Image: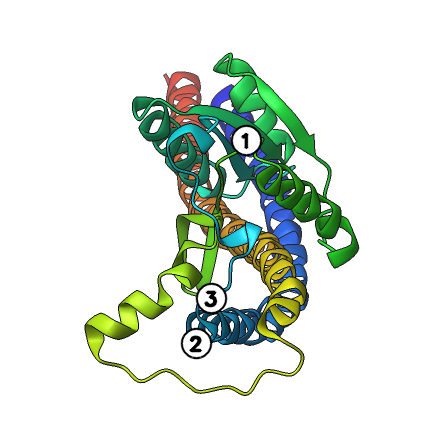
Amino acid sequence: MAKARAIVKRRKAVRNIRKITKTMQMIATAKFQKSLKRAVGTKPYTLKVRELVAELAASAGGVDHPLLRSPQGNDRTRRVALVVITSNRGLAGAYNGNVLRLAVIKARELEAQGEKVELYVCGKKGVSYFNFQKRPITQRLDVSDTPRFEEVKPVSDDFMEQFTSGKIDAVYVAYMNFISAGQQKADVMQLLPLANIEAKKEDAAVTGKTLAVYEFSPDPKSLLDELLPLTVRGALFQAFLDATTSEHVSRMIAMKSATDNADKMVKALTMRYNRARQSQITTELAEIMGGVEAMKG
């Protein structure tokens, strides 16, 4: 009887856990749908602005801008900022692990090149991880679970100020890149300097691609002064949106898997309970029949 009771208690506990995971799955699904609209809605704009600025910078020719500089020789400070975007909550599968693993690989790669890596971490999971690893965190970034442009803009402006003033040589962002609902990939993006924009003209010369010809009004420098900071802000904001959307997808999948496993466990425990109960009934019947036979004798 004791064995059957233990199985019943365990089955009840699993059913309670299943209710929790099912609820969390539904919440994650609702948040994902909302976050997906923002991430998918802003990505074409971000990519097109970056492409447009790249063509402007390449076709203008001879335009020098602080955000396009590549520190060389004595201009280098050997200091690099690495932004790591993680979640505030767990139960999201391998989401945080993949981002943190890639961030550590990038940090070690930069340190092997003689760079001093300064960590800027967003999310409690990332902060806890680097504290455990005893890696100093330069700054903890406070961005809400639903990132707003007003929150990200001061962060990107601070990085641009440090970069243009020569305090840091580069800025990298480690985050989960949202490709589709079925595919998310941990990635490291170079935010500064805008290397891909600076190399646009060289790539065009190699591939033979003809660049668009623009008539500038106002002059190219004035346009780039306005568009280059916008490109940096947009790229960092898009990284936060992608990371948030990927987090909700990962949690939704993890909670669905947990719910399915709970269902399987409930079925397995029910079968075990039925066998235990059947064995108990058989034992009781045998005892009764034994007693009857004893009374006859």
Q: What element carries label 3?
A: loop
- Circle 3 sits on which residue? 181
Task: Answer left or right for 236 relative to 78.
Answer: right
The spot of residue 188 in percent (x, y) is: 42, 46
Q: Are discs 3 and 1 less than 8 Å apart at CB?
A: no
Q: Amino acid under label 2?
A: Ser
- Circle 2 sits on which residue? 59
Q: Nearer the viewer, mark 3 or mark 1?
A: 3
Packing grade of label 2 (10 A; few <14, some 14-19, many >=20) is some
Residue drawn at (47%, 48%), measured in percent from left and top? 69
Towards the viewer: 277 or 33: 33
Mark 2 or mark 3: name the one nearer the start of the chain: 2
Per the model, the C-alpha gap separating discs 2 and 3 is: 37 Å
Q: Amino acid under label 3?
A: Ala
Mark 3 or mark 1: name the one nearer the start of the chain: 1
- Circle 1 sits on which residue? 10
Residue 199, placed above or below residue 208: above
